Image (tube, coloured by chain):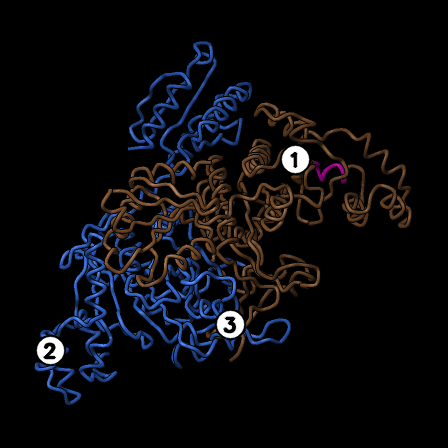
Chain colours: A brown, B blue
Amino acid sequence: MNSPKTLKGFRDILPKDARIRQHIIQSMKMIFERFGFDPLETPALEYASVLLGKYGDEADKLIYLFKDHGGRDVGMRYDQTIPLARIIAQHHYELPMPFKRYQIQPVWRAENTQKGRFREFLQCDIDIVGTNSPIADAEVIACALEIAKTLGFPSPKMHINDRALFDTLHLSKQEIIILDKLDKIGKDAVIDQLNGIGINGQERFETLERSKKTKRLIEICSFLELMGYVEGKDFIVDPFLARGLDYYTSAIFELKDPSYPQGSLAGGGRYDNLIGIFLGQSIPAVGIAFGFDRIIDALQIIQKTPSASSITHALVCIFSQDMIAESVAIVNTLRSHSIPTELYLDANAKLEKQLKYADKKGIPFALIQGPEEKRDGIMIIKRMTTKEQLRGTVDDAIRIISAHETT
Amino acid sequence: MNSPKTLKGFRDILPKDARIRQHIIQSMKMIFERFGFDPLETPALEYASVLLGKYGDEADKLIYLFKDHGGRDVGMRYDQTIPLARIIAQHHYELPMPFKRYQIQPVWRAENTQKGRFREFLQCDIDIVGTNSPIADAEVIACALEIAKTLGFPSPKMHINDRALFDTLHLSKQEIIILDKLDKIGKDAVIDQLNGIGINGQERFETLERSKKTKRLIEICSFLELMGYVEGKDFIVDPFLARGLDYYTSAIFELKDPSYPQGSLAGGGRYDNLIGIFLGQSIPAVGIAFGFDRIIDALQIIQKTPSASSITHALVCIFSQDMIAESVAIVNTLRSHSIPTELYLDANAKLEKQLKYADKKGIPFALIQGPEEKRDGIMIIKRMTTKEQLRGTVDDAIRIISAHETT
């Protein structure tokens, strides 16, 4: 077979991107855990019957389904919410309630790739299952705001609404779908489309603008204020926020940052009728999902991408075949100080080639000890970006490299 | 649908286990990176043609294969080596050579679950591609030894051999397969089985015992000694080490620890004819794979499992509806000191119920501030394991909880 390729919609994550992604995942995990969310993982494959009929007819068509070796109908993970519902049904005796979990795993959807969508992408979800308390809604919102701040977004703001408002105003599903487009198509077009389905768009707009906070929103907002968040700055009640998905039953939220008008960074809400689906009962739940690829895109645009330079801080070169022992000793010392260090892997390569390798990998320092330097108990410490060459002991090298790390 | 289940051979990883696994993965990543290995990820699905015919006929039957929505024959990731070979073919212009990568992803195999095998399990591999240098072999071995030490294995030892030895002695594939069983069935049974295929088992044994280190082994051992590892203690040349897999071409190794005689913790070797398979050329490579489930099993047996207690260090209780603000303030302060903290999520729950939640989740401290404590500027700091109750300020609480963390 010649020139093998990745499948359309699938990606290799090469080291540079893998490092950025891992850095963001680590930050998210840290904040999730600071808020008391526990990690959870579910299998890539489920019985097809667990998945089918839960996401709607259109989505069902996008699930990767096949027969396994035992003739069972199976499907690949499509989201992390239905597997969570299965977990709750299967393990509810052993799980503490309320159950707070985070989950960061890939999901697979046979999407139309022409829309720029991937068929394999990472989902990052937090959910609190088993309580209807508005404190839970506020905690989920607060956690998402902290993530955005930690990642470097300058002014993240949570837009909040309550689906109950739409019920009170007797808004149809069709109307909600039109309202949901406000960000994309603007007020005038929304009014036009509402008029188009026989509703007085202008009046509808004014009614919503005049609408008051629901009881749930009043409670959530007051908790957020107790937590130190400021209405108008950190969060805002937005009566036009609709969210596409059917399954939300109460509060809904979307995290935006003005520096990234292209879309929301996270979205979620309260959904009290989904998690109990396998138990045949109502189990309250609230959660939020981060758009991982969206966040990476946004961080790039606002120039806050975590440093993608090499993990390796120093390359120890091999001056010559009979100087290997000295190079290995330097590597050992640096690693014992937890400095990620590479030994050049060919004892016969010219120094020029070794330095080129450091350059190509973006390793910031190269260390070289020849016979002269050995005699003086020092080495050459070469800063790869500036080509500046210092001479110093291994302790000097450790100090210089560690100082670079923290800048 | 009633009582949904996981598929046979698939597992949910609930929080307690997920925490242990993440802890081990983090330790491995830290050491991998200290040795200059970079992260890499490949898709869960590949063209079936990329996978088929690479692992042998028996293995081909275990690959999860199906037709995707576009009618393409696809297969699920079966290992991480063939995808690495594809990556080298597809991206070789942008990758620095030698290419050192680590990869920690699940793979899927339709194994016979009666043998205690899982159909979804995590692989943890490091490989160095593009150099034939024995330094690379030594670096892979050293990295694996450091991982085992970091994870708490008392005396990890790398068993090393060279496939070239078998070639020199003209050992047949059948003989190698029998020798590979030495650990499991013992010397006498191996000699019997060798006799059974018409070979003088006793003589073969003595020949191997008398065999000398190959040139490659001499080089690897001398590098390991330069790195500070001691022959006999940290590594040993074991002429009976065979490794089942066909594709090794030179050095092979297996990591064992006497505290866990059940099996090896990692295994690998040099395989110079596999990575270039898609390019139609020979590309040297050496690597090692850790048995993740095996390591978890071993750590349990030697009682070195990382602490599985809750990530959450403190539960802040809510004394009463009108004391929520005080509880939220305590939560904020603890979290701002990076202490993973939960606020109890129901303002109307009895304290007893709140403490039960802390118990069930294994949260080590509960903090309670009622009106009296508020008046005195203090709170009750309850150590959940001993039920001991201290009284102190929020700074006291932070000090006590942080001290617990580090023990």
* Residue type marked 1: Met
Disc marking residue B205: 2
Give the magenta-colored segment's residue range.
Answer: A161-166
Q: In the displayed structure, would residue B155 be above or below residue B84?
A: above
Q: Is residue A108 visible?
A: yes
Q: Mark 3 points at which residue?
A: B75
**Most distant residue in the top direction:** B375
Subunit that carries the residue with mark 2: B
Subunit that carries the residue with mark 3: B
Instruction: Estimate the x, y position of residue B205 in percent, counting from the top left.
Output: 11, 78
Instruction: Estimate the x, y position of residue A35 in percent, counting from the top left.
Output: 49, 35
* Residue type marked 3: Gly
Q: Which secondary structure type mostly characterizes the magenta part of the structure?
A: helix
Label 3 secondary element = strand
Q: Name the residue under label 1.
A: A158
* Residue type marked 2: Phe
Label 2 secondary element = helix
- The alpha-carbon separation of the residues under discs 3 and 2 comes to 43 Å
Q: Which corner quadrant of the image does residue A188 belong to?
A: top right
Label 1 secondary element = strand
Q: In the displayed structure, would residue A149 be above or below residue B1?
A: above
Disc marking residue B49: none
Whether pointer 3 and pointer 2 mark residues with C-beta atoms closer than 8 Å, the reply is no
Residue sitting at 65 percent across and 62 percent down? Answer: A111
Tell whether B138 sits left or right of A205.
left
Residue sitting at 19 percent across and 72 percent down? Answer: B214
Nearer-the-camera pick, A202 or B1: A202
Instruction: Estimate the x, y position of residue B246 in percent, counting from the top left.
Output: 32, 77
